[in-house]
Image: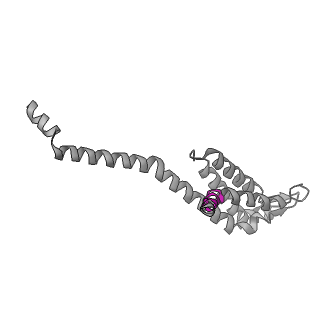
Amino acid sequence: MCNCIKSVATSDVFCSVISGVLVFCISQIILEIIIKPKIAYRNLKNRISTACIYYADVITNPFLVEQEKTKEQFDWFQNSKYNEASNELRQLASEIGAYSLKKKEAKEIGDLLMLLSNTMWYYSNSSHDGSDNWENLERLKQFLQRKHRKQQDKNKTR
């Protein structure tokens, strides 16, 4: 029995099978731990970019609410593109907050998305009139393009 195990363990076929299984297991671990999260993070950044382009009209022109908000204004806002944009940006902010790959970048993007989500409307007597939403949208755009820009700079120096 012992000689049988020794002969199998030292055979070329057994060693090839074991090394193939080890390579497969290591590649699956790398795929699941490193590659898939990076792809998902990049896809989420693409979704954020798409949402910012799609909702740019309402992000940069927030809804003015009179001090005494009427039921009609409230109902209109709840069924408007403003509310849709606010909810979408809030959802994206919560999704990007789950990424620990690039904590600082994800936190900055999430904070900007939440800020934009919270400033879809303003009161007439408020100091906020939405003018800084454009600047915040531009800052968000810079964060989303940061890696792409670094890659372009590397290619230019070659």
Residue at image position (9%, 35%) is: 4
Q: Is residue 97 left or right of residue 112?
A: left
Residue at image position (47%, 48%) is: 34
Furthest-front residue in this view: 158
Residue at image position (52%, 53%) is: 38
Residue range of the region highlighted in magenta in the rendering: 145-154
Magenta segment includes 44: no
Res 10 visible? yes
Q: Position of residue 158 (x, y in %)?
A: 59, 61
Magenta segment includes 148: yes
Res 69 visible? no
How many numbered circles does the render carry?
0
Q: Is residue 116 left or right of residue 27?
A: right
**Residue 148 versus residue 117: which sits nearer the camera?**
148
Furthest-top residue in this view: 2
Dominant secondary structure of the residues highlighted in magenta in the image: helix
State which quarter of the image contains the N terminus. top left
**Residue 5 versus residue 84: which sits nearer the camera?**
5
Q: Is residue 146 above or below residue 15?
A: below
Q: Position of residue 120 (x, y in %)?
A: 77, 60
Task: Name the colouring of the figure.
Answer: one colour
The part of the image, by quadrant, that contains residue 87 is bottom right
Q: Position of residue 88 (x, y in %)?
A: 65, 59
Q: Position of residue 24 (x, y in %)?
A: 32, 49
Furthest-right residue in this view: 125
Q: Is residue 139 left or right of residue 144?
A: right
Q: Is residue 46 left or right of residue 120?
A: left
Q: Is residue 25 above or below residue 77?
A: above
